[in-house]
Amino acid sequence: MGKPLVFVGTVGLMPRVVHGQPSHEKQARPGDLIVMAGGRVGKDGIHGATFSSESLHQGSPAGAVQIGDPITQKKMHDVQLEARDLGLYRSVTDNGAGGLSCSVGEMARESGGCEVELSQVPIKYAGLLPYEVWISESQERMTYAVPPANAPKFLDLIKSRDVEATVIGRFTDDQRCRVTLHGKTIMDVDLTFLHDGLPQRRLHSDFQPPPSREPALRPRKNYTAVLNAVLGRLNLCSKEYVVRQYDHEVLAGSVIKPLIGVKNDVHSDAVVTRPLLSSLAGVALSHGILPWFGDLDPAAMAFCGIDTAIRNVVAVGANPERIALLDNFCWCSSDEPFRLGQLKRTAEACSRAVLGYGAPLISGKDSMFNDFKGFDASGRPIKISVPPTLLISSLGLVEDVRKCITLDAKAPGDLVYAIGETRDECGGSEYYAWLGESKGKERVLGKNVPQVDIPAALARYRKVHRAIQEEILVSCQSLGLGGLAVGFAKIAMAGELGLTVDLDAVPASPKLRLDKLLFSESQSRFLVTVAPAQRKRFEAMMSGEPFALIGRVTKEKVLILEGPEGPVVEAKVLELKAAYKKTLDW
Amino acid sequence: MVKPRVLVLTGYGINCDEESEFAFNQAGGLAERVHINDLIAGVKRLSDYQILVFPGGFSFGDDVASGKVLALRAKANLGEQILRFIGDGKLILGICNGFQVMAKFGLLADADGDYRSQRLTVTNNDSNRYEDRWVYLRRVSDKCVWTKGADRIYLPVAHGEGRFFAGEEVVAAIERNDQVGFRYADEDFEPAGGRYPLNPNGSLRDIAGICDPSGRIYGMMPHPERFLHFTNHPRWTRLKDHLRREGKPMPEAGDGLRIFQNGVNYFR
């Protein structure tokens, strides 16, 4: 048991302008009251942020974990929107890491100082030390800067919604952060020192690429069994069991759901939501997370993660010119030079990639010590660390949700095209991981991790986007884990139709042996289907791209992948689907 | 003509109020979200509206049992007003958590017209977990105002406590009085016969929605407000492609809109 990580993302929506003011601007002024609203402060979440950023060990405090209360959260959220629309407060910050010390401390910068009387802060129970009240991360709390003239109305409104709100101090402009308890000063710190007083820590990093080599591969005559096995791997298999347990349709804006196809049971590349029901605009969400690539080269993890996150939203119809990204670094042992070297290399690659794609990183998160220190069964000390992991989330704008598309094959006779080149890039792939596991010995990572040509990828994404906008594509899939083989399987499974593909026609460089062609995870590739009537328009639109007509959709529910000496995969689509589902079919 | 005014209840964890408001406005009503505390405090008056909606959500955190606490709060503070509202011949719709609230309030009355006693419930799914999935529904009741014309409809459910349950006599009475709004069905709209996941929660007799004896007061587990646009359909990209090959345009509205139009048109 190590330190488990769960990645969670949220997207908020706000009006650009409220009461004639840009709604993202906030400005606490001297004299504004400091109001804390929502839940009460308890001993839960003391040093919560510190806890989540250090390794888990025997002495880790149980109280560091915050106790959530969704109903308080929802009540507070509702009333905050009411207060916002009435223009009752000038600034707001949530009480996350560091609790009041951070929320009030941050807002104090806007006005130039603050005074807080801790005895006014509502607490869950007696017995909290003053510093605990100041830093507790108890949840569902917001801190507001409320002009005194608005205070009665603001407090009444919040009270009328059964939410607690309390004036705990006021913002000042004397450049001090002052905290008192029953009038007695317990903290009085210069604001500049509070924010910028921490001396820059110097760390040493050192990156050496780990030794790697390509595995010796035994050619097979048939890869049907391999495809079935790869489809059932945890990273690729159906997570319908989990997805169904989350409300993915609340607010009624769902356009492309997490599960698509004839039976609503194959994962889509991205989801699309229409956040305003009165508008046709949509937001596409997806992600790229490839820690296995990072084990070979952290820069490849970043380039491929960003390319994947972008490609996935482009595949459902997002405009490649209007994509924003988030970076989430979950690292381990970030005091060791090698880990820091990996971190630096990842960050540098992120910088180059986002500039290349013109897709800004607008938010993110890091957690640097995902290590567990404990003892194994025989009492020996043990350290378990997560692999350095970069998660890139993508958020792409869709101008008209009615043009979104899905990856499922839709009609027999449609043409199947591969767009983008398949290369000898199985390093860190699902195929190699399966090879290693099936032999049961050493992990097979390989060497040739996928590389990204950003200008070429971006040009391709623009063309694919245009084809989607002009409604030339019937289906579009971003190729990712498991490569072409899994891509074909998903198109067929989702449409419950067959495909017959000539593997020889797939654009590849150099000419690849069949297993590499099938399972390489080369980036920036798509599989699309096109109605025969659109063939000319499509091919003209793709001119200049490495693309080829490689097969057809068939009525028989059989996936046939032809090699030079006959079929190398011949699988019933429903059997593939069974393999895809059985791993997590609870 | 004057648009009927629709009161969409909010507060305490209700979270389908915005789309329910949109749905009624889209259907030609004049909808307004009103916090239950504003009704209790008299800031807003129920008598000013023609339709009352209990939307979906997780009111009071689903504590005790879904819908139970909100039902008690409504009954204790607004009980008389709601009974008068019913007596005035007005309409009530409850969706998902709103249906749970209505069931626990007792609003889904039997033939005797008692709107205060709980005789049926919606409780934990047979699967024992929350599930979001689309279901096929077949209209049953001829008297239900809300389901008119929606003979066959495909809608999402999203709940952990959606299993309709009641004693045999109550179920028999509900069926005898033509109070079953929709039943869960298969793709051909034949009865689900309790088969999971067609009947997603194990509801008795595949019952997905129930109205009162007048047909005006109606609650259902599936979410019609989540199918207001054609693009909400889980397979709309396929349907669009097939229509396109036949040279037909893609519809804009989703089938769920019908339910809301039925409510609004009742007052035309």
Image (spheres, coloured by chain):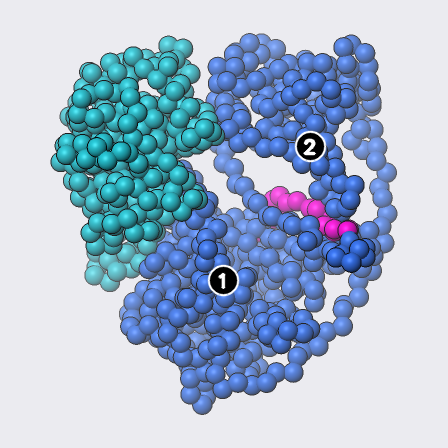
Dominant secondary structure (helix, strand or loop) of the stretch shown in magenta: strand
Q: Quadrant of residue B129?
A: top left
Distance of label 2 from label 1 (alpha carbons): 36 Å
Crowdedness near tag 2: few (<14), some (14–19) or many (≥20) residues, C-alpha within 10 Å: many
Identified at 49% across, 86% down, the residue is: A221
**Which contiguous range is marked in magenta?**
A359-374
- Outermost front residue: B168
Residue at (53%, 85%) from the top-left corner? A220
Residue A135 image-quadrant placement: top right
> In the figure, is residue A228 to the left or right of A170?
left
Residue wearing tag 2:
A45
Give the amino acid at mark 1: Thr
Q: From this view, report whether residue A15 is shown above or below residue A401.
A: above
Q: Is residue A528 magenta?
A: no
Q: Is residue A529 visible to the viewer in this orientation of the structure?
A: no
Chain B shade: cyan
Chain to which mark 1 belongs: A
Q: Quadrant of residue B158?
A: top left
Instruction: Report if residue A364 lies within the magenta region.
Output: yes
Let me know if marks 2 and 1 both belong to one chain: yes
Total residue callouts: 2
* For residue B252, above or below residue A386: above
- Chain letter for blue, please: A
- Which residue sits at x=23%, y=35%? B168
Please report the residue visible at 44 percent of the width from the left and 62 percent of the height from the top.
A581
> Which of the pair B166/A461 is nearer the observer?
B166
Chain name for mark 2: A
Q: Position of residue A128 (x, y in %)?
A: 73, 21
Q: Which residue is mark 1?
A: A583
